[in-house]
Image (spheres, coloured by chain):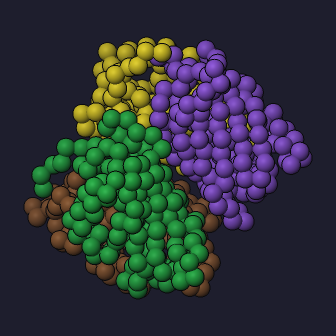
Chain colours: A yellow, B purple, C brown, D green
Amino acid sequence: MEELSQAGQQVLESQPFSALLEARLAGLSEGEAVIEVPIREELLQQNGYVHGGVISYAADNALTFAGGSILGPTVLTSEYKINYLRPASGETLVAQASVVHAGKRQAVCRCDVFVAGAGGGETLCAVAQGTIASVAVPEA
Amino acid sequence: MEELSQAGQQVLESQPFSALLEARLAGLSEGEAVIEVPIREELLQQNGYVHGGVISYAADNALTFAGGSILGPTVLTSEYKINYLRPASGETLVAQASVVHAGKRQAVCRCDVFVAGAGGGETLCAVAQGTIASVAVPEA
Amino acid sequence: MEELSQAGQQVLESQPFSALLEARLAGLSEGEAVIEVPIREELLQQNGYVHGGVISYAADNALTFAGGSILGPTVLTSEYKINYLRPASGETLVAQASVVHAGKRQAVCRCDVFVAGAGGGETLCAVAQGTIASVAVPEA
Amino acid sequence: MEELSQAGQQVLESQPFSALLEARLAGLSEGEAVIEVPIREELLQQNGYVHGGVISYAADNALTFAGGSILGPTVLTSEYKINYLRPASGETLVAQASVVHAGKRQAVCRCDVFVAGAGGGETLCAVAQGTIASVAVPEA
């Protein structure tokens, strides 16, 4: 699993947008992935909460990494759906995704997005569900 | 409509995450909104395409602004679904959303996300559909 | 809970389409609902599997009843998303839904749809996620 | 196109569940499909409106046929999302789907579901979006 986790770290580090958001791969094992994003001023919306776009990023990427933990590193999110549950405010955004079902070329995954506060408590702020597909990587 | 457009600009400018992404409100009229994001290195994923999180951000925010053009400024996205169609590569990401149906407190909207290239052509790279809700703004 | 379950039964029995499908409310408690549909020839598609429309019906209705167990009896599904995982073949379709988060007027729920076979085993064949809304009932 | 339409009719007629619902393939051309369901008592919910399960069936099947018009006859819906907009009451449920983007093995489609009344007017009652996949047919 150490190997899997290191491969995942390399993929995340090679995503400039993930670097811009200072996202971390906090966990990666077969069928499970955790993406964390430290909450800072630049990631907020007009009312002081984490912008939905950041929550979507975290859910989308956690879904992709969970799928990739089964399907291999060259995967992408085909589609997903997200329901926002509560305004997100706290120290760290934590997106936990797991594979529900995997075939050879596709995996269906679910994701829970929490906010972890200074006191250690976690609040569920969004849930997502989507499809990850194994792909040959197109050249940019 | 000029007033509506100015109110929309103010909301977008007051979103730190939209500023981080250098997003622009390229159009806002009753039932329609266009969000543009200039594509730059920091917004890409590991293969040189625009990161899905950026596309999701643009779709989500365009849906919200389209809904808000009917429901008023204090709205948020309750939920949405997005299908990625093609890898996104070009100069500008353009998310065009329109209201399909609006009630008093909710609007259902659709969004097409294009990439505009140097030559002026546009390529559809994602489609989304979601619900925008009118809310009393909670204090952060 | 007995009361809740009986109220649920009455709602299901008053749905002509649920009667056409011979659907049963196999369980209803606070935040949880189980809808069962006996699989018969009339519910199949062209390859001998349960038609997706039946699976969607079961998921949609289980989501609604789960939401209604918290929000009260006058609810409807605002929206949902479903991923089909495997062809469904067996004796009984079982849709188990639970509330993920409930506010005053809305609940977000998830649903797993299984097929139970003659031997007693269950196979997951679809997963869904959606929003249930409390409504004043419009007169037909 | 006549050939395409006839092939579609055969598929629909070989679906026992579509026969139970008395669904008709009202149109099928490259990238477009229309499924109609005559509204009758048995298809309603407890308040006298068309049951959501019927609307979902129509949307799902129209999406599948639209995708199949491009990808070929052995397709299935991988996933879709639907937003219900208004209670559906009238003479005929009409689901119109079109392909937004098609690759070799998958197509992303959208669907509008209307109710047509006695007077000829149509009311939009639901919108859907989903993925159709080309498959080798598994034996039941």
Q: Residue at x 48, y 26 (%)?
A: B87
Q: Position of residue D46 (x, y in %)?
A: 46, 83
Q: Residue at x 60, y 49 (%)?
A: B110
Camera-side residue: C56 or A114? C56
Of residues B122 and B29, which is closer to you in this image? Answer: B122
- A124 shown above or below C45: above
Residue A117 image offset from top left, x and y in percent = 62, 36
Corner quadrant of residue A42: top right
In x, y percent, where is residue A96?
45, 36
Against B56, is C134 above or below? below
Q: Among all residues in the image, which is located at the extreme right?
A: B3
Does residue A74 appear in this view?
yes
Q: Measuring 52% from the left and 75% from the top, which residue is drawn there?
A: D116
Residue C37 in view of the camera: no
Left or right, B133 with reference to C8? right
Q: In the picture, residue B38 is in which quadrant?
A: top right
Q: Residue at 40%, 73% (x, y): give it.
A: D37
Quadrant that contains the N terminus of chain A? top left
Percent x, y of residue A88: 64, 41
Task: Please count the marks in the image.
Answer: 0
- Relative to B123, A76 lies left or right: left
Residue D133's quadrant in the figure?
top left
Q: Quick one: which residue is furthest to the left in this view?
A: C119
